[in-house]
């Protein structure tokens, strides 16, 4: 259980770092649309694939040396930690997307054509 909590804590720290870095990049350059949630999702899936290769190919060949890392239960713990943080990353990405769409809806261009009508043009 402690390995699961350690894996979860490190994955959450990586997710937070990536979310903060993407947010700062978006503030520095407004024309960029970086989403830390999706970036973490790609990173976590890549890490999970490499973790599976290491666990079942490399560590399985030397069980006396890498016994605790090469077991299936250790891989399941790491995969669950990846899955929980991926769900959280998807939630953050959806919230960011909804917030961005809401902000764009408020930025509609209003053209005064006459005192009685207003034209709203999305940009």
Image (cartoon, rainbow, N blue to C red):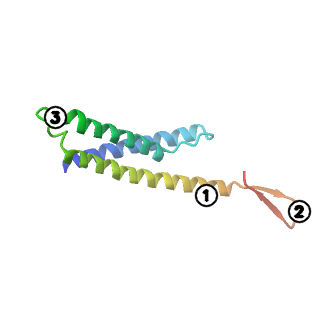
Q: Which of 101 and 21 is in front in this view?
A: 101
Marks 2 and 1 in Cβ contact (< 8 Å) = no
- Which residue is identified by label 2? 114
Task: Give whichever of discs 1 and 3 has the lower sequence position.
Answer: 3
- Answer with left or right where residue 55 lies relative to residue 120: left
The residue under label 1 is 102
Dot 1, how many residues are within 10 Å of its Cα: few (below 14), some (14-19), or many (20+)?
few
Could you say where residue 63 lies in the image, as x and y percent from the top left?
Answer: 13, 35
Under circle 3, the secondary element is loop
> Which numbered circle lies on residue 69?
none
Decide: marks 1, 3 in contact (CB < 8 A)?
no
Q: Which of labels 2 and 1 is toward the front?
A: 1
Among numbered discs 2 and 1, the one appearing first in the sequence: 1
- The CA span between labels 2 and 1 is 27 Å
Task: Specify whether residue 82 is in view.
Answer: yes
Q: Which residue is drawn at 50% across and 41% down?
A: 22
In the image, residue 55 sits, relative to residue 91, either above or below, namely above
Label 2: element kind? loop
Q: Name the residue under label 3.
A: 66
Q: What element carries label 1?
A: helix
Q: Residue at x 19, y 51 (%)?
A: 1
Q: Residues within 10 Å of mark 3 (few under 14, many from 20)?
A: some
Find residue 111 and report its horizontal and vertical position in percent.
Answer: 82, 56
């Amino acid at each position: 259980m402690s390995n699961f909590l350690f894996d979860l804590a490190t994955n959450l720290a990586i997710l937070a770092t990536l979310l903060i870095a993407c947010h700062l990049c978006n503030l520095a350059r407004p024309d960029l649309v970086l989403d830390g949630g999706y970036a973490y999702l790609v990173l976590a899936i890549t890490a999970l694939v490499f973790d599976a290769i290491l666990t079942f190919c490399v560590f399985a060949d030397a069980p006396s040396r890498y016994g605790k890392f090469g077991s299936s239960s250790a891989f399941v713990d790491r995969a669950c930690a990846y899955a929980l943080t991926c769900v959280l990353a998807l939630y953050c990405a959806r919230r960011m997307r909804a917030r961005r769409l809401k902000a764009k809806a408020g930025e509609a261009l209003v053209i005064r054509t006459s005192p009685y009508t207003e034209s709203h043009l999305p940009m």
